[in-house]
Amino acid sequence: MNIHKAFILGAGLGTRLKPLTDVLPKPLVPVWNEPLVHHALRHCMQAGIDTFAINTHHLPDTWQTAFPHHSFDGAPIEFFHEPELLETGGGIKNIASFIGSDPILVFNGDIITDIDLTGLMEAHVQSGNIATLAVKSTGPNCNIAVEDQQVTDLRNLLDRHPGNHQFTGIYCISPEILDLIPAEQKISIIPAFIELAKCSQLGAFNVDSASWHDIGTIDTYRQIHQQHSDADSSSNFIDPTATVAPTAKLRNSILWPNTTVTSDAELSNCIVFSDTPIAGKFANELL
């Protein structure tokens, strides 16, 4: 059985990325001049995903603007709005009708990566596990215990192991996991994972060879652009709809759609995201 459905987690508040997320939900924040979520959708489609679900909460109308036809490159998207945030477990329970009897891929909406999704999905189907997590053996939060391609503990909640792997926020689940998530509750997916670890049904798929970026903060947002720049120290990312006066001076700056930079502006390492015309000299500012 091939996996052809994916659930993109899009409902978070993006608190660490404020004030950018005062304007857009984090998955719609532009990265390399297109919404962050486009990178996840395209990555999934390259691995054979052809149908998507996305949960929403913060600034829900912006999703309608971004996807007026509820599709991306021909792949249908079903939106599940959460008036009250349900967290990861509740969000999955809320899309039970989308899951049906199929295993699905779950993808955090703030991740840019080249993880081998095909390998992950094949490993999940072949293993018979109810969930399979994509993990790395290095990272800032190695609290997932892995032994022989099985997750044996998470956050040391089972007192088995403090952890030796980083969870990437990307995983596969089979519909049986819905039985472990209470209905209509705000709850993390972690309790369900713990129950699966207890009965050796929580797999691990190592993705050490992949690049992986969690675009969770202003610093990581800047870094992903800097890493994508060429050797020119004045590299900028300017949306095609932005207006820049010919005499304006920009260096290492990011301009969002429909922003305006006036003729006397000098910007260095700035992010322009408001609809107010920018004039004057600024460095390392959010404007």
Image (cartoon, helix red, strand yellow):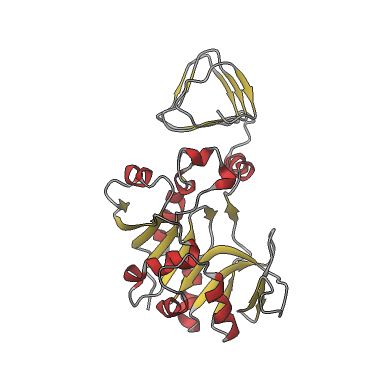
Determine the residue positioned at 54% across, 16% down: 279
**Is residue 32 something that shows in the picture?**
no
Where does the image place residue 88, in percent across and percent down from the top left? 49, 64
**Is residue 83 something that shows in the picture?**
yes
Residue found at the far left of this picture: 69
The image quadrant of residue 82 is bottom left
Where does the image place residue 195, in percent across and percent down from the top left? 55, 81
Where does the image place residue 19, in percent across and percent down from the top left? 55, 37
Seen in the picture, residue 144 relative to 149 is either above or below; the reply is above
Quadrant occupied by the C terminus: top right
Task: Decide if residue 2 is on the left or right side of residue 169.
Answer: left
Task: Decide if residue 68 is on the left or right side of residue 278.
Answer: left
Determine the residue positioned at 44% across, 48% down: 58
Nearest to the observer: residue 59 or residue 182: 182
Where does the image place residue 277, in percent across and percent down from the top left? 47, 20
Quadrant occupied by the N terminus: bottom left
Seen in the picture, residue 23 relative to 277 is either above or below; the reply is below
